[in-house]
Every structure is written in structure tokens, then in C-alpha cells.
Amino acid sequence: MKAENILFEEALNLTDKSWEELSSISNSLREKYKDSLVFTCAIINAKSGACSEDCAFCAQSIHHKTNIKIYPLISTEEILKKAEQMKKSGATRFSIVTSGKKTNKRELERISETIYQIKEKVGISTCASLGILNEESARILKEGGLERYHHNLETSRSFFPNICTTHSYEEDINTLKIAKQVGLKVCSGGIIGLGEKWKHRIELAFTLKELNVDSIPINFLNPILGTRLQNMPLLSPYEALKAIAIFRIINPEKDITICGGRERVLEELQDKVFNVGANGIMIGNYLTTKGRSIKEDMEMIRRYGLRLEDGNERDA
């Protein structure tokens, strides 16, 4: 097996190994392609709740009864303030996230102008996660200076009907293709621990490889009361670390970011994410759940001897 040109069946065989066994391969690939550089991504929940989609894990779906805040698109000033705050705290990338299947043109134009102001006034790499795109909406964002578009596939095509029935997998695939067509970098990954099998995880990793996405965010299910998956058992930390390693082996040159659920699933093993191949983490809070302190995350990066992608160490 050549780690950098692995086949599906070879990847499936890796699931018999422990995360410690896989780490020598996955960590060497991280070092080869990413050296000692890592990045930190922060998000803002710029429009919350009232989503028409029925994604089984999501607290923002109208199909679930959860105790979250619901509000329309917030002001440019609020987003700018958060971007500045997160940059000072150590974020090297900043993403505007909205709930809902897609964003209307008026909202897109406001967000595009906000992105322009972030670049001018804050000076941080910009990302957006605004649902399904068509070519017009993608171009509006590109014209505002957006660098990267985030849109998770969540799981494999074959397992997707167990998670969402209100839109097709192909709509998600098309959104990624459209974003790439207009010149945006693409960030797409999924959630591990939805009830899927290893073959589904590997199928997702290969789909992302075929789509040639630039960055792969890996989340771990944090079951939320009121959602369809509220009683799903928590993933073991060892299975989570193994998943990161295998995603790195299948996608050796890509950015791999560890995002939601890591605090609850990995607990004291969070610093091992770099050892199994990750080169980025999300810092701060998530959409509807709390993250751990940014200071702890920045200390973790320094402790591992890594540098932020802009070459500067920041104090949290």
C-alpha cells in the first residue's frame, strides 16, 4: 500500500489497526505536506435557527424541539467586531455561518459587503457557510472578496438518506462544484458518529478526494437533546483519532481541521489530533454549543511545537 495513493479496500483494512499504529503514517504525511504549520478557524453564527431541513443531528432544524436562540441575519458591525476579537485571540481564518437551506439574494449582498469590510478593516482570511449555492450567489460572494466556501457533505452518499431527507446529496455536491468553478477554495467534510459504519466514513473521505476539496473539517457528534440523534452513543476517543488518521492517509495533501464535538469526545486526548494528521482546529464556540477556552487551545498548539500559518505566535 502506498499511503499517498491508497485504494478503497486498502483504506478499509486500516480500520483493523489502532490509532497509535496509524499515527506514524498519518503524522509523517502531515509533516511532509504541512511541515509544522497549523491554522485556527473561528466562526460566527450570523443567522440562527428556523432551518427547513431535517438533518438528524441539528439543533437549528424546525423539525426538532431544542432550546436555541433564533434570530435573523445580524449586522455587519456585529460580525466585524467578532472577526476582530477572534483575530486578536489567535484565529487565522474566520467564517460567517447562517442557518437554512440557502441564503436569499439580499442577505448574500449584505454578507458580500461584510466580507469586503472584514478584509479591509480586520485583515483575516475569510470563509462563509451559507447553504446551497447557485452560480449567481457564488459570484456575489467571490466579488466581495470571499476566499473559501464551506459546505459539509456530513456523511457518505449511501448513508445520507438516514440523516437528511429534505434535500438531495447531489445538491450538496453541486454547491461544491459551483464554488470551485467561480474560483473559491472549498471546505467540506462531515460528522463522525451519526450511526454510520467505517465503510461510510471511508466512502465520504474518497468522495472528498474525488471532488478535490481544499480543506476537510471533521466533526464528532455531540448529541443534542431534542434532535433525532439525541440518544446516539458518544463516539470513543480512540475511534475518533483513528478516523482523523484515515482521512489524512486518504487525503494526504489537504487541510484537515478538527471542529465540533472534539472537547466532549476526545477530552484529555485533544492534543493527539496533530499526532494523527490534523493541521487545523476550530477555536472558540460553535454554532449552538460551547467550545473550550481559546487560551487552552493556543497553549496546546505551542506545546506541540507548531506554528500558526501566518508564522506568528499569538497570545490568547
Image (cartoon, rainbow, N blue to C red):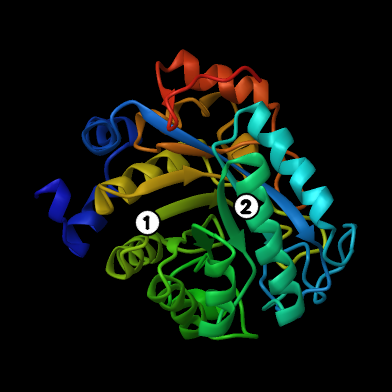
Q: Tell me where residue 199 appears, x and y as whole percent.
A: 35, 64
Which sits in the foreground, 173 or 168? 173
Q: In percent of the image, x 50 and y 77: which residue is there?
A: 172
x, y (%) of residue 107? Answer: 75, 73
Q: Nearer the viewer, residue 108 or 95?
A: 108
Tell me which corner region of the image, top left, top right, bottom left or bottom right, holds residue 226: bottom right
Residue 134 falls in image quadrant: bottom right
Q: Amino acid at mark 1?
A: Asp
Q: Residues within 10 Å of mark 1 (few under 14, many from 20)?
A: many
Residue drawn at x 55%, y 50% as measured from the top left: 219
Q: Secondary structure at mark 1?
A: loop
Count the marks: how many?
Answer: 2
Question: Along the line of sight, which residue is nearer the eye, 76 or 151?
Answer: 76
**Residue 297, percent from left and from top:** 59, 25
Nearest to N terminus: mark 2 or mark 1: 2
Whether residue 233 is visible to the viewer of this picture, yes or no, is: no
Name which residue type carries label 2. Answer: Ser
Numbered tag placed on residue 159 in the rendering: none
Q: Is residue 297 above or below residue 178?
A: above
User: What residue is shown with label 1?
Assistant: 214
Q: Position of residue 291 (x, y in %)?
A: 70, 37
Q: Could you tell me which residue is drawn at 67 percent across and 28 percent down?
A: 88
The residue at which mark 2 appears reads as 95
